[in-house]
Image (cartoon, helix red, strand yellow):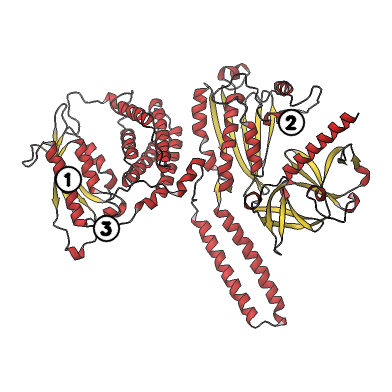
Amino acid sequence: MGIDISQFLDTFYEESFEGLDTMETELLALNPGAADSESINTIFRAAHSIKGGSGTFGLNAVADFTHVLETLLDEMRDGKRDVTQQAVDLMLSSVDVLREMLSALRESADLDSERITTVHDQLEAMLKGGDDGKAAETAPTDEAVDGVEQGGNSKWTVVFKPFNGLYRTGNDPVRIIRELDDLCSIVSEIDLSTLPEFDLLDPEECHLSWTIHLDGDITEAQIKDVFAWVEDDCELTVEKVSSPHADVENDSDASAAVVAASEETIDAAKETETPAATAPAVKKTPAAKKAAAGESGSIRVGIDKVDALINMVGELVITQSMLNQLGEEFTMDRVQRLQEGLVELEQHTRELQENVMRIRMLPISFSFNRFPRLVHDLSSKLNKKIELKVSGEQTELDKTVMEKIGDPLVHLVRNSLDHGIESPEERVKQGKPETGVLSLNAYHQGGNIVIEITDDGAGLNAEKILKKALEKGIVKEGDNLPPEKIYDLIFQPGFSTAEQVSDVSGRGVGMDVVRRNVKDLGGAVEVISEPGVGSTFTIRLPLTLAILDGQLVRVGDETYVVPLISIIESLQINMDNVNSIAGGAELYKLRNDYLPIIRLHELFCVETENHELSGGLLMVVEGDGHQAGIFVDDLLGQQQVVIKSLESNFKKVEGLSGATILGDGTVALILDIPGLVSLSRHRGDASASTQAAVA
C-alpha cells in the first residue's frame, strides 16, 4: 500500500521557509563584484533543496520557478557570471515570489500568476545576457560550446541506472524523462534485466535502468542539470555521439509515445504506486491555517534540551521508586527519609519544569532575521544610507512571545528609518557620518527580556510633539510636562507629527498598536531621546506567558497573585501620609510623590474585617509608567504560578489578567497591574473633575 506523503508537507513548508530566510540573509551579505563563493554555494543549496522538494510534492509551479533561479546561481557559482547589484536585487525579488507562492499553496489560495510571470521573465532575460555579467562577455560566437554548434543540433546518449533506494528519496525517473522530453527529442530504452520475479518484487525499490538518446539543441550542462536531483542516487553516463543513432527518430509524437511507454512499464513493474512515484495533490491541513497569522505549529528543539529532559525524567522515576518503597512498609523512624525524598521530588519537579520551558525557548534571532531585508529595502526607498547592527541575537525567549512581538518591532524599526535617521545630506550638514546606524539589542534582565531599538538620528522633537498634543486636546495649555512625559505622548492613539503621510509611516496607527501589543504580553515600552543624538525604544517582556513569578496577597478570605515584576516595595501605612480628596479618592505621600490608593476589597466587592488603612499593608506597584499603592490585608509568600486564561474560561474582567490553581487546590486570581493603575488614574481624574465642578 502506498504512503500518503502529503503528511510531510508541513515539514517541507517549514524547511522551505527556513531555506528562503537563509537565501535572503546571504544575498543581503553578498558584495557585488567580490562575492564570497561559499555564500553563493549556500544560496544555491537552499534553492536546490526547495526545487527538489517541491518537485517531489508535485508543486510544479514552485519547481519551475526555482529551476530558473538555480540556473542563474549555478552560473555564478561556476564563475561564468559576475555577481552584480542588479542580479542580487532580482534574486531578492525571486525569494519574495517563492515565499508568496509557498504561503499561497499552504493556504490553498490562488497564486499571483502575473507577479510570478514578471519575475520569471526577468530571470530568463538575465540568463540570456540581460546584464553586464561574464555570461555576456563569454557568449559563444563561432566556436562550439559544450559540443553544441550555433544553429545546429547535437546528439547525446545518456545511461541512467538508479540505485535501488531512489524512490525512498522522493525522486521519480518518469519525471526526469519527462523533463528531458521538454528540452529536446528523445528515445528511451528500458533495461528490465535486473527486474526480480513477481513474488520477490519490492514496490519501494527501483529495479529498472534506461538508455536515453537525445537529439536537439542541448548542452551537456543542461542534461546534467536535469539529473541534479538524483546525482547521488544513481550511476549516470552522458556521452556525445558524432553521428545520429540508428534508432533515433526526430518525430516528437514518437518521443512522447516512448515516454508514455516508459510510464506504463514502470507502473506495471511496481504494480502499486510508491510514495516517490506519486505526485500528490496539495491538501489543506489544519496546521496551515496558522500561517496567515505568522505563527508556526511546530518547533525545532536542540538535542541537548531533549537529553536534559530525558535525564530529568529518569531522576523522577528513581525518586518515585524510592518513595513507593518507603510507603509500603512505613514506620515513624522513616519520617526523615520521607522528608528528604519529598525535597528531592520538589527539586526534580522544579528542574523538569525549567527543562520543559526551555523547549519553548528560541533565540530572538528568529525575529531579528527579518530586519536586514527591511532595512535594505526601506533605505533604498527613502534614499538613505543606513547600517544595521544586531547584538544579543542568541538571547532566548518563549516562542509565543516572540511570534507576537514581531509586529511591534517592525513598527519601531520603520519609524526609526523614516522619522529618526536623517538623509545623508542632512547628516553631513550636522557633522554626522552620512551613514546612519540602527541598532537592535536583546538581553536578559531578571526574569525578563529587554529589547532595545536605537538610532543615531535626529531624536524626538519635544516642542513639536507638545504642539500636536495641544491641537488634539491630549494635554491642556499650561501643563508643565517633563521631557519623558512628552515623549510618552507618541503612544496616544492616532498621534503623529508626520507632515506627509507615506506608505512607510505617518498615519498615527503604529505607536499605540506597539504599546497595546506589548501590554497584552505583560510587558512595557518606554522611550529615551536626545535631540540631534538619537532615540532608544526599550521593550521589557516576560520570558514566557505560561508561568509567572508572583507574590501571594490576602484580602479578606480571598488570595490574589501580584506579578513580582510590577512590585516596587511593600510598607506599613503611616496614616500621617494619607490624604483624601473630593470624591472619596485617597492618596499616599511617598518620598514627595502622591500615589493613588487602590482598595481591592472595594474594587472586587470582597468581604473583609479590615477597613482601616492602619490595619493592613500598602504594596507599591508600577504599570504603564505610573505608580499606585494596593491596600491588602497580608503578604502570604512568593511562588511561581501557572497562568490560566480567565477570558477563555469565563470572561474578561477589568483589573484581572488570569487565574491560577494553588497547591491546596484553591483558585487565585492574578491582578492586572497596568489595568488597575489605569483604573485608579481614571477614578482620580473623575474625582478632580467633581471637585472642580463643586468649586
- Circle 3 residues within 10 Å: few <14, some 14–19, many ≥20: some
- Image quadrant holding the C terminus, namely top right
Within-10-Å neighbours for mark 1: few <14, some 14–19, many 20+: some
The tag earlier along the polypeptide, 1 or 2, is 1
The residue labelled by disc 3 is 204
Cα separation, mark 2 vs mark 3, equals 69 Å
Q: Nearer the viewer, mark 1 or mark 2?
A: 1
x and y percent of residue 384 in the render?
A: 53, 22
* SS type, badge 3: loop
Residue 83 image position (x, y, % from top left): 37, 29
Which residue is at the front of the view, 557 or 188?
557
Callout 1 amino acid: Ala
Label ID, residue 260 = 1
Specify the quadrant of the image occupied by residue 59: top left
Q: Could you tell me the amino acid type at mark 2?
A: Glu
| In the image, residue 645 above or below residue 91 | below
* Residue pictured at 17% horizontal, 48% vertical: 262
Q: Residue furthest right?
A: 576
Residue lying furthest left in this view?
246
Is the Cβ of the residue at disc 1 closer than 8 Å to that at disc 3?
Answer: no
In the image, residue 144 lies at what x, y percent?
A: 17, 29
**Res. 212 in view:** no
Quadrant of the image containing the N terminus: bottom left
Q: Is residue 665 left or right of residue 238?
A: right
Q: Residues within 10 Å of mark 2 (few under 14, many from 20)?
A: few
Where does label 2 land, which residue? Answer: 484
The type of residue carrying mark 3 is Glu
